[in-house]
């Protein structure tokens, strides 16, 4: 096996420079732990940025992959695909939304959602196409999803972006109301804004947004690419709010490491797509769908959302306790195992580096926020170990 320096040199020479990478190459994983090229273990509290919900090397995922090798890997959507139909049956049954479109990533799921609501908005002869999105949102990097993303720094240099997107402050109902006009077709929100720093929607806000959408005949698109599938302590984050969206996007954890995305919609909305309206070669590929079925069965069968709720409570309590005892923690935010830690007196990149040196992987957002997305199977002991490492890391970072 190549060592880290060689891998870094090859990457620098041949891979486009679009990522800031931590100086580690991970080669093995088991449960919540991963090992690098030097054989060093880490507790993985990044989880492939919310992908590895079942941890690494989960037996159900490995069994599904082995099983899938006995069947055709790929056929294209020119043919019927049994695992795709079965996964669709399962997802619609669980979400209460009637139809699914399959793709390969979060940004594609949102791209599909944007196209679907635009089609729907023109069906009755009116010209409704505008989507109201939130400031500080993140919906992906392809042009449509990027246009929906309310962070100007990601738009820079890529203009002109597709038009028809309006941005309002998150959790501000009056601003949302004021942004609606006769061309508005949908509101698009993350129930918990993840990428920008873990900001949950207020309970009353999402409920009121649902009512507002109903009152104005608008569609509600919820992007649960990061928050969905058990992460927040419910299978779908919208369950916390007692509402259901008209359109829902999923990806990340759905394949627990195998790329797959999904866009679900109510039947009446989904019918706006007809053959030729949208498509993708790999979407709903038999291999990815077999694995995703096993992932869903495991998440639901083992009630991992409930486990995530309990583990999240434990983690947030331990982090708040750390803050009370030692300082450095201004606020702990989040739902379930989607946790943001607002720091004070230490910088997030420094704490991230010190944690990494002590065997814990976390995600730094900007200069003051840590994002923790541990696998849903994380134990209390692993949570306590991680918080212990964070305490040592913050202490070291505060001395710099
Ligand atoms: C809420 C949300 N939507 C969309 C995306 C984009 O997903 P992908 O990177 O799979 O395209 C992300 C990625 O972080 C996300 O957090």
Image: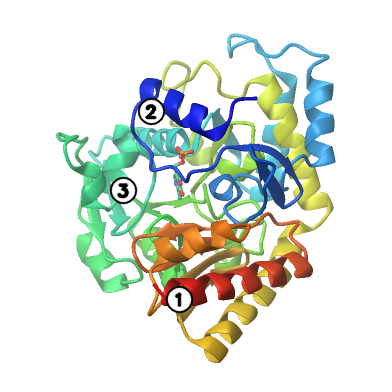
Judged left or right of residue 328, residue 119 is left
Describe the element under mark 3 as helix, strand or loop: loop
- Marks 2 and 3, how far apart in space? 29 Å
- Marks 1 and 2, how far apart in space? 48 Å
Q: Is residue 29 above or below residue 326?
A: above
Residue 251 in the image: state x and y as whole percent.
56, 40
Describe the element under mark 2 as helix, strand or loop: helix
- Marks 3 and 1, how far apart in space? 23 Å
Q: Are marks 3 and 1 in contact (CB under 8 Å)?
A: no
The residue lying toward the viewer, choosing from 135 and 344, is 344
**Residue that badge 3 annotates:** 149
Judged left or right of residue 302, residue 85 is left
**Residue that badge 2 annotates:** 12
Quarter of the C terminus within the rendering: bottom left
Residue 140 in the image: state x and y as whole percent.
38, 41
Indicate yes or no: mark 3 CB to ligand 1 under 8 Å: no
- The answer to whether residue 112 shows anywhere in this view is yes
The residue lying toward the viewer, choosing from 180 and 189, is 189
- Please name the residue shown 24% across and 68% down the image: 175
Q: Residues within 10 Å of mark 2 (few under 14, many from 20)?
A: few
Residue 130 in the image: state x and y as whole percent.
25, 45
Mark 1 or 2: the one toward you? 2
| Earlier sequence position, callout 1 versus callout 2 | 2
The residue lying toward the viewer, choosing from 373 and 142, is 373
The residue lying toward the viewer, choosing from 180 and 373, is 373
Q: Residues within 10 Å of mark 3 (few under 14, many from 20)?
A: many
Describe the element under mark 1 as helix, strand or loop: helix
Q: Which mark is residue 204?
A: 1
Q: Is residue 72 above or below residue 283?
A: above
Q: Residues within 10 Å of mark 1 (few under 14, many from 20)?
A: few
């Amino acid at each position: 096996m190549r060592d880290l320096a060689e891998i870094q040199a090859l990457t620098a020479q041949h891979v486009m420079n679009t990522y800031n990478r931590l100086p580690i190459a991970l080669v093995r994983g088991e449960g919540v732990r991963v090992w690098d090229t030097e054989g060093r273990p880490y507790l993985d509290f990044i989880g492939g940025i919310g992908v590895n919900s079942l941890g690494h090397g989960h037996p159900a995922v490995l069994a599904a992959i082995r099983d899938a090798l006995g069947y055709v890997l790929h056929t294209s959507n020119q043919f019927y695909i049994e695992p795709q139909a079965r996964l669709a049956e399962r997802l619609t049954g669980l979400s209460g939304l009637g139809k699914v479109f399959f793709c390969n990533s979060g940004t594609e799921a949102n791209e599909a959602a944007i196209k679907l609501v635009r089609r729907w908005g023109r069906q009755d002869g009116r010209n409704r196409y505008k989507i109201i999105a939130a400031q500080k949102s993140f919906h992906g990097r392809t042009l449509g999803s990027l246009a929906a993303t309310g962070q100007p720094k990601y738009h820079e240099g890529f203009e002109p972006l597709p038009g028809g997107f309006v941005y309002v402050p998150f959790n501000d109902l009056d601003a949302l109301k004021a942004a609606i006009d006769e061309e508005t077709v949908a509101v698009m929100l993350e129930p918990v804004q993840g990428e920008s720093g873990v900001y949950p929607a207020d309970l009353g806000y999402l409920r009121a947004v649902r009512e507002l959408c109903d009152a104005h005949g608008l569609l509600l698109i919820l992007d649960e690419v990061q928050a969905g599938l058990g992460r927040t302590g419910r299978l779908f984050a919208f369950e916390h709010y007692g509402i259901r969206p008209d359109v829902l996007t999923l990806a990340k954890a759905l394949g627990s490491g195998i790329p797959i995305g999904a866009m679900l919609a109510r039947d009446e909305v989904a019918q706006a797509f007809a053959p030729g309206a949208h498509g993708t070669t790999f979407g709903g590929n038999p291999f990815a769908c077999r694995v995703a079925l096993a992932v869903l069965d495991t998440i639901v069968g083992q009630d991992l959302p409930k486990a995530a709720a309990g583990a999240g409570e434990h983690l947030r309590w331990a982090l708040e306790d750390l803050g009370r005892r030692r300082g450095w923690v201004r606020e702990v935010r989040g739902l379930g195992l989607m946790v943001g830690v607002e720091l004070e007196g230490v910088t997030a990149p420094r704490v991230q580096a010190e944690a990494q040196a002590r065997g814990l992987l976390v995600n730094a957002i900007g200069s003051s926020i840590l994002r923790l997305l541990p696998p849903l199977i994380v134990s209390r002991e692993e949570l306590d170990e991680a918080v212990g490492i964070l305490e040592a890391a913050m202490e070291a970072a505060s001395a710099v």
